[in-house]
Amino acid sequence: MSKWLDDDEVLVGEGSGEAVQLSPRARTLPPGSPRSGHGRSPLASPRSREPVPLSPLAKTMSKAKQLFLLCDKEGKGFITKQDMQRLQWELPLTPEQLETVFDSLDREGNGYLTPVEFNTGLGEQVELEEVTDLDHDEAEEELDEADFSQDPSAVRFVNILMELGTDKLFKDQQELCTLWCELQRDRPEMLSVLEGILVHAVSHLQDTMKERDSLEQALRRRESEHDQVVRSIYEEMESQIREEREKLLAQDSIKQKEKGKILEEELRMREQELENTLKKQTELETRMRQLSHEQVNIKEQNQQLQDLNMQLQEQVERNKEQLQAALAQLNLAQISNAQEQLARQRNVMKVSRNMKKEKESLLRQLEILRDMNKRLRDEKDAQQSQKRTPNVTQALQKRGSVIGNYLLEDKPMKRQPCSADELEQDKKTEVTISSKKHQPSCRVRGENVEQTQTQSKAVSTQQVFKVVFLGNSGVGKSSFIQYYCTGRSDSKVSTTIGIDFKMKTITVDSTTIILQLWDTAGQERFRSITEQYYRKADGILAMYDVTHSASFTAVRGWMDSIREKMCEGAVLMLLGNKLDLADNQCREVRTEEGQKLAEQHQALFYECSARNGLNVEELMNHLAGMLVTQHERQCEDALLLTETMPKRSCCA
Ligand SMILES: Nc1nc2c(ncn2[C@@H]2O[C@H](COP(=O)(O)OP(=O)(O)OP(=O)(O)O)[C@@H](O)[C@H]2O)c(=O)[nH]1
């Protein structure tokens, strides 16, 4: 144990583990001491000036303290069973033995050892060993005593010591005995001095020992008090630490709860975001699938289009070839067209020449009519005057009213030619017509002029009405006229070029009238010619094909144009032809549409068939009646106008 302490220090104490340093006390012999003893007794020994060796207990305490510090490396102030295991490198003990030592030291059984418990317990254990060691030393001393008991002087000295009661004080009695023997032999006078010194020393030693004992007791008391104080401080500190720990735990738990709530909220938000993200992902995947599907479709379509493109390119090539062939044909057609156009121009020139001639003839007819009108007035005046003076009649007649002569002689009037060419070409179709009002006769061209009624009497009731047929090419104008005039239908009717006409004589309410049926060409190129004819027509028949909507669309234009240019008082009729085909799902123009258009233009409306003659007769009778009525109204108006006008101006 001396290796842990300096030689001049003494550690005493028990339980607390804290050694109390006592100042080294010089235990010197009085001056003049002959020689120092051998080791153990301080008396008259040269080594008595050396520091007093430590007591076993102090050494134990010091050792215990160091062992405790070794275990409590962290400086906790106590050690556990695990800390105790660190001593297995310092002490020759196994871990199990160390555990046993710990259990024996931990008398309270709380699982840890304070420094007091450790040092006290260890000290007690070491004391037992010391006691054992002391017994061993005593045995050795007894052996030594046995050595010097043979000397009578030594025996005597021992007896003296025993008498003094110091036999227990000096453990190294052999040196004293040797000193005693040497003094007795060499300086017997010094024996009394030695004895005095011994007595003095003994008393001093005894006092010192008593003082030491009292100090040790005081020290133990203080140590126990200190231990108690330290223990109470420890306990207080432990309770404070526990409270603080609980407080901290409580604060931590509140904070952790708040943090937990925040984290839960955050977690919820994250979950929401995650759900949204997952939804978006699902949508995107769906969209991706759709897109890929569409892409596949588009690829297929692309492929198809490429194939189609190839086919089209091939077709284009073929078409190019065909186009070139067509161009060649077109050139040929253009040449033939130019030739045809020349021929048409010639025809137009011819027609216009005819029209000019017709105009001149009409003018001449007008002149004749005026002339006749004048004569009729003269005759009327003559008749009136004859009524008043019957003898005058004969004279007037004689004076020569041309009309009167014609009437008396029953001589037919010479007709004025409508068209010079036509009159020359077809002389056999002459018809002599006259009227009560002495309308002039006229000669017309026509293949089927029907003379239904001719009266041999001088006064004829026949009137001529000019009826013009209009409409697109192919609607059946020529066929209609053909059927009306002949009562037959002909499927092979050639298209009309320019103008053609036929005549038909009919009787309406005992009035015989002649209908001049003007058949116009429906082709657009003759439009300007046809317009000339319906300007002065008495009746206009605008025709369309009920099985051909384009013809109905065209007839609207015709109707507008007719309305603009037709004479006042002329009768307008809208005709839907080819009614025989309307039942075979071929009808393209409904009856209501035709009626509506007719109403818009204040026109009569019929649907008919030039093939089977449906409604043909009826509508023409209706038209004729309207014409007669209209004519009579015009005549009445004219008569009224004439009567109201002064005679001079009338004649003029
Ligand atoms: N089924 C049927 N066919 C008709 C009728 N009317 C005329 N057609 C036929 O229609 C075709 C044309 O008839 P056209 O009389 O030449 O016609 P369009 O209006 O005179 O013709 P353009 O002279 O060119 O103005 C002929 O083949 C006729 O047979 C009808 O009522 N019924």
Image: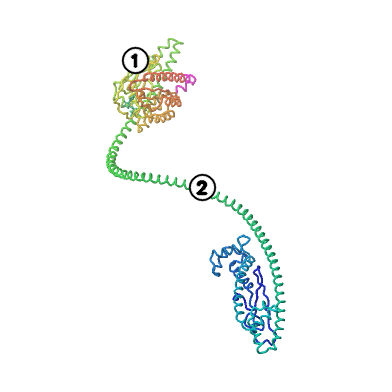
Location of mark 2 (residue): 275
In this rendering, would 10 be left or right of 452?
right
Amino acid type, mark 2:
Glu
Residue 59: x and y, percent?
62, 73
What secondary structure is the magenta-colored segment mainly? helix
Which residue is more in the foreground, 147 or 278?
147
Q: Residue furthest bottom?
A: 186
Give the alpha-carbon distance from disc 1 to disc 2, as whole Å: 108 Å
**Quarter occupied by the C terminus:** top left
In this rendering, would 536 be left or right of 80?
left
The local secondary structure at tag 2 comes to helix
The local secondary structure at tag 1 comes to loop
Q: Residue furthest top?
A: 390
Amino acid type, mark 1:
Thr
Magenta-tinted stretch: 639-652
- Ligand 1, by image quadrant, is top left
Colour mapping used in the image: rainbow
Q: Is residue 356 visible?
A: no
Residue 326: x and y, percent?
28, 40
Observer-side mark, 1 or 2, equals 2
* 120 over 537 or under it: above or below: below
Which residue is more in the foreground, 371 or 26?
26
